[in-house]
Amino acid sequence: MKRYSAVLILGFLVGAFSISQIDRSIFMAEAKGNQDDRSLVYEQLNLFGEVFDRIRSGYVEEVDSTDLISAAINGMLTSLDPHSGYMPPESFEDMQVDTKGAFGGLGIEVTQEDGFVKVVAPMDGTPAAEANMQSGDFITHVDGDAILGLTLSEAVDKMRGPVGSEVTLTVVRDLESEPFEVLIVRDIIKLTAARTRVEDNNIIIRITTFNEQTTPNIQKGIKEKIEDLGGIEKVTGFVIDLRNNPGGLLSEAISVSDMFLHQGEIVSTRGRTVNQAKRYSASKGDLAEQKPIVVLINGGSASASEIVAGALQDHKRAVILGTKSFGKGSVQSVLPLGENGAMRLTTARYYTPAGRSIQALGVVPDIIVEPLPVTPSDEDSEKGSDRITEADLKGALSNDRLSPEEKKLLDDEKETQAKKAKRRKQDYQLSFALDILSGLSIYRDYK
């Protein structure tokens, strides 16, 4: 320590002859500040070493030095924010497999909030989704063991296990209600990152996660559905369903946004220094060819999902519908540590094209639609509507000018109304989105 300080002071003296008296004072003050900071760091590291030695020699039971160091590293990282942490070699390998779209587990994305493990979203078609796990659920116990106080990695490790084995989660859904248990059978999670289907000449794109499969899944799906409909001119619009999508790779969020934007900024990231700022812009080309788009989001839409929704919203390329998103506006970098695994470190915040930070705020929909409004009765769902028209009145005159085409149109209308009523009951938000696309299409035709 003393030798190092002496070297620093000697360097300051050598350079002092080339600066003015005022500059010299400032320079010396800054150097002293840096020296004081270094001295404090060394003192703290010495403290760490002393605590480490005392634990190894004096703790009631023998402890593994490697476990102590791992816990110290993880504690240092998790003290920063809920998304930074240490990944031992096994966890690092699991993460690399996860991003490729096939892995073993429950199919649930979790985060940590005030020490509690909170569900961001269950993934479509996974054991967690089939067990009715929901965004916002808190997991308090795994197989009867409390996980409060564990790191997120430790809690996740407890939920992992052999394929086919059972795990019982204790869940708190409403803070005023009693906890309940959910039994889930672990399985191989094979995620199709994105699926496409057609409904009323609208192409619906359901994106469950952002991994290496997302972009090719969407590109292939859109191409096939456009061909099935007989060309893009037959397409009314697109629905991008991001509900309960917990996010994933930043690069995939940028790629998906780029598919529907012809130009302009998609997202920017800003780190600790100006040199760390990056901007990502769209390239020419729009797979939807300027057809109207509605994006569905909810409280389980996080991170990469919010990048896509925020970009399309700011460029007024899509109508955002649903409920406010999760609000994760930070970027994590995975930094390998050789054979010792890796560290996940929050290195930047991301901002939408309009400069908005979504962190702890989320994307607010253009049209707020709750998932469970008052729905029609079962009888209404089958009949389509209980409203009375002239044709329903007793003794009403018939229309003597109805052509065969008009009669068919009336029959088709009844069938359509019944179909819409059923769809509203099954998925009100999606039904609302399709109605908006229909209206936007008519508006575009008038223009």
Image (cartoon, rainbow, N blue to C red):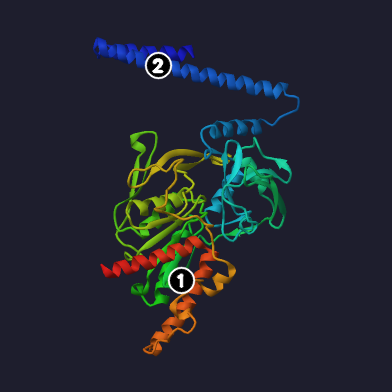
Residue at position x 47%, y 42% in the image = 332
Q: Quadrant of residue 440?
A: bottom left
Q: Secondary structure at mark 2?
A: helix
- Residues 279 and 311: in front is 311
**Nearer to me, 193 or 91:** 193
Q: Is residue 275 left or right of residue 185?
A: left
**Left or right for 417, reference 15:** right
- Mark earlier in primary sequence (1, 2): 2
Q: Position of residue 94 (x, y in %)?
A: 59, 49
Amino acid type shown at disc 1? Val
The x, y position of residue 432, in whole percent, is: 45, 62
What residue is disc 1 on?
198
In the picture of the structure, the residue carrying the numbered disc 2 is: 33
Q: Against 241, is 333 above or below?
A: above
Looking at the image, the residue that sits furthest to the top is 21
Q: Quadrant of residue 235?
A: bottom left
Q: Is residue 181 above or below residue 50?
A: below
Q: Position of residue 88 (x, y in %)?
A: 60, 41
